Structure formats: C-alpha cells, structure tokens
Amino acid sequence: MTVFDKLKDNWFLLAITIVIFLADLAPFIGAKGGPLRPEITVKYFAVSFIFFNSGLSLKTEDLRAALLHVRLHVFIQGFTLVFIPCLVWVLVHFLMLTPVDAWLLKGLQVVGCMPPPVSSAVILTKAAGGNEAGAIFNSAFGSFLGIVVTPVLLLVSMASSSSVPFSSIFTQLSITVVVPLLVGQVLRRFIKEWLERTKPPFGTLGKAVLLLIIYSTFCDTFSNTALHIDHLSLCAMVFIVFILQVCLISFTFFISQVQFFGFTPSDTVAIMFCATHKSLTLGIPMLKIIFAGYEHLSLISIPLLVYHPTQILLGGLLVGRVKQWMLAAEKQRKEMENGEPSLNTTSDGSNSRDSI
C-alpha cells in the first residue's frame, strides 16, 4: 500500500488534525459570535443536517426495531446517567486530596452528570458500521432525559439548585433532532429506489459535518483566554479526562460482550460511543443556566470543553479498529449460529475480543 493510499484511508484523522490547527491559528473565526456564527450554523444547521442525513439513510424497519431494543436503551442510559456520575463522584473526592484546582474538580463532576450528545456518537457509530438506529434513539432520548435528570444529579452531587427552562431546551431538541429525523424518513419513502440505486455518500457527508463541529469546538476552546488557572492543574485535568475516557470505552467494550446482556457486536459499537460521550451542545447552555452568577463559571466549564474534543478525537482514532473488530466479530457470530466451526480469531490471528 502506497503512502497516498494510507492517507486516503485515513483522511478523516488527517482532516481532524488540519481543522484543529486551523482553529488554533485563528480561533475567532469559528468561536461563538465569530464570522462562522456557530451558535446558528453548528447549533442548528449542522446538528439538524446530521439527523436529517441519518433519517434519509436509515431504513425505517431498522429504526422501528431499535425502538423495541429496550435492553440496549436501559444499559446505555443507566451507564451514562447513573454509573458515570457515581464513578466521577468517587474520583472527584479522591482527587480533592491532590493539588488539582477545586473548581476544575467541580467541573469534572458536572461532566459526569451530562447527558449523551446528539451528534458525535451517532456519526462515529455510523462510521464504524455499528447500530446506528440504536445510537440515534439513545442520543435523542438521552438528551431529552438529561433535561430533567442532569439538574437533579447536579443538585444531589454539588448542592446546586436552579430553574431550568425545560420548554426552550425541549423545543430546541425537537427542532434539531426529532423534526430533521422524521423529515428524512418521510422523504426516504418517496426516493427510496433512487437512494438504493445511487447509494449517496451519507457517511462522508456526516464526517464532513462532524469536522465543522470539531472546528467550532476547538475554536471556542482556544478563544477562551479569560481563564485564570495554573498550567499544572490544567495539564492534570487533560490527563485525567483522557484516562477516564479510555477506561470508560474499554470497560463498555468488554462488559457489553458479556453473554448475559445478549448484545450484538454492532450494539457494542453503539454502546462504546453513546454510553461514554457527553454533550457539549446541551452542556454549555445548562452550565450557564445552572451556575448563573458563579464567579468561577469559566473554570467549571473547562473539563467539559476538554472532554468533548477528546471524545471526538478518541472516537476518530478508534473508528477504523472498531469497524475491523465488528466485522470479524459479526462473521464469527454468524458462523456459530449456523453451526460452523470458528477459531474465535480475526484475520490476523488475534482474538476478536481483544483486537481493539
């Protein structure tokens, strides 16, 4: 394989590196209030396009089947809105014994209470060939659930109380998630034959939109120069967030393959991304509402600003490996169901469970 072929196969990772560099070069362009107007183009149009794209490309029967996959929904929502907040609560109390800034630790607890995202988890699941329908349902349902659950979790874990405008957030989610998805599904009925004949590059289009979201996210991160914090605490938080995500992704990968749950390899892919990702789109508005008037709001926001791009970067790095593992695992599962012999190995001779 030539260098060009390798670059072609990994164009998405290369593109991520480029957009981050561009964001660092001139963050004002994609930051909130900048020429790109991400508060409109990204918040509404980009997210809406992702779900319209999913609605157009997703078979209606697959989406209908996903709604009935209750075990998957309970696992993902329970993991992201119960297990992770409890785990982070324990971690934060342990880290209080260290010199890490206390407000950053509060911000880490906030991250643990956040709902799943409404875009990145779906795109990454689709790019890896996982259960896209399950990812769409859990991203949307988790976001709606988070409107109520997240403030309650913050109230319990941080003794914070506030009045959250449920109606406005609910309306925004309906406009950017539910409506585009339904419109895509309705339109698909009229052009289904054309879609199956031409096979439009839905995956590539979705990745392109995700690049826009990544660019905007890093622009916001790099443009936030009003943060007063020592570099040691900031580096420590970046390291903590990275290790936490690696552990969560690894744990969901292995635990979701336990026979008791009965998940398929494609379900595992959806779980890895949906159950471990946290929403910046919902998170930042919620932070501004829940911690309105807090002098240290910018410090509390840092862990979420770090967590969001980190989950996208890690996801982008894992997509190729996850897709290879899923294809090998699906092939092995079908062989076992058909009574054919299986060596429980991938094409390179390694065990499929450990190939990621």
Image (cartoon, grey):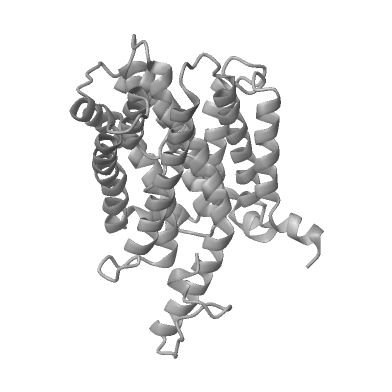
The image quadrant that residue 295 belongs to is top left
Across and down, in percent, residue 228 comes to 47, 16
At a point 71% along the width and 38% down the height, the residue shown is 18
Across and down, in percent, residue 252 comes to 36, 57
At a point 53% along the width and 70% down the height, the residue shown is 327
**Image quadrant for the N terminus?**
bottom right
Across and down, in percent, residue 54 comes to 53, 47
Above or below 323: residue 45: above
* Nearer to us in this view, 152 or 104: 104
* Nearer to us in this view, 90 or 305: 90
Q: Is residue 265 left or right of residue 225?
A: left
Above or below 274: residue 237: above
The image quadrant that residue 178 belongs to is top left
Above or below 61: residue 186: above
Can residue 78 be seen in the rendering of this structure? yes
At a point 54% along the width and 19% down the height, the residue shown is 224
Across and down, in percent, residue 76 comes to 32, 50
Above or below 119: residue 101: above
Q: Is residue 135 left or right of residue 192?
A: left
* Nearer to us in this view, 103 or 207: 103
Can residue 186 be seen in the rendering of this structure? no
Q: How many marks?
A: 0
At a point 39% along the width and 54% down the height, the residue shown is 271
Q: Is residue 36 left or right of residue 178?
A: right
